[in-house]
Amino acid sequence: MPLLKRHDEAQPRRLSVICVIRWAKAAAESPGICLGFFSGLRWCNPSLCPLSSRRPTMKVALTAVLACASLAVAASSWPAEQSRTDLIRITAQTGGRFVFTQGQRKTVLNLQNSITGCTTQTYVLGSNLRDDVRYGVRVLDEVSKGGFQYVVLQVSAPPNCNVNGVCGAGANNDVLWLKFDSRLGLLSKQAENVEDCQRNKSLISAPPRPDSFSPLNMQGGVLSLRMEETDFAANSTRRTALRYDRRLPERGLVVSK
């Protein structure tokens, strides 16, 4: 008696599909898409995918690998919220990286140190649950002046990578000012935190917005914010103000008491 039963021509394809379905299920339960693929391979065992279906299975597996790579790229990058008329298009990536594109020119910057919130993965303490952070990015302003280009961003990220920890909900907010030359080379940057749950820092004066996830808004070409930071241990409160004027973008973010 042969070790493996013979299957008709349609059977291998059906079994290959079953393999991929099980792979997808395993991938969905794994911390990462590509890691999930390799985890899912354990479901394609000889009893499920006989030798007669090896070639179709390998074809489907190769397709799955390519799909995995495409999905991983899509999952780790996303476009900023910005006007269609903005000349510089911005894409955010996991880990605090940004891609600035203008025509054929492209600049990639790692701005993780300028962001106060979590930009990598959130997790649930005591479990294997992990999720790549898609922090919010909104273009507040783009201006060209004197041969230079200026970009002002609002970045909203979870205050804590541990979703069950202190400040696991809500969002920290940072305002980033970037100065580029005509070839999209970074000349200068500035970052100011305006909301930070763990530092008890919040906005006390700003255009109305329902919560920390909501966008900051400029009025009359000016971004004007007032922040309050409380140190409960020292029983003290510190207030600061931030102002940006698109008519004078070269001044950057002006911070005062």
Image (cartoon, rainbow, N blue to C red):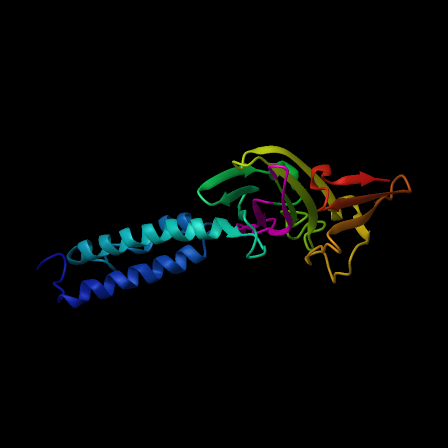
Q: Residue furthest right?
A: 235
Q: Is residue 119 left or right of residue 243?
A: left
Q: Does residue 138 show up magenta in the picture?
A: yes
Relative to residue 24, is residue 114 depicted above or below?
above
Q: Identify the magenta region.
A: 119-148
Q: Residue furthest top?
A: 187
Relative to residue 189, is residue 25 depicted above or below?
below
Query: In this rendering, does residue 185 appear at all?
Result: yes
Locate residue 204, reporting x and y percent.
Answer: 83, 53
Pick the residue in front: 135 or 162: 135
Q: Residue furthest front?
A: 146
Quarter containing the N terminus: bottom left
Q: Is residue 220 left or right of residue 85?
A: right
Q: Does residue 133 show up magenta in the picture?
A: yes
Query: In this rendering, does residue 39 appear at all?
Result: no
Pick the residue in front: 157 or 214: 214
Locate residue 206, reporting x and y percent.
Answer: 79, 55
Locate residue 112, reporting x and y percent.
Answer: 60, 39
Relative to residue 189, is residue 208 depicted above or below?
below
Pick the residue in front: 46 or 225: 225
Quarter of image, res 230 = top right
Q: Is residue 152 left or right of residue 23?
A: right
Locate residue 168, reporting x and y percent.
Answer: 68, 52
Pick the residue in front: 16 or 68: 68
Q: Is residue 202 left or right of residue 124?
A: right
Q: Number of numbered discs present?
A: 0
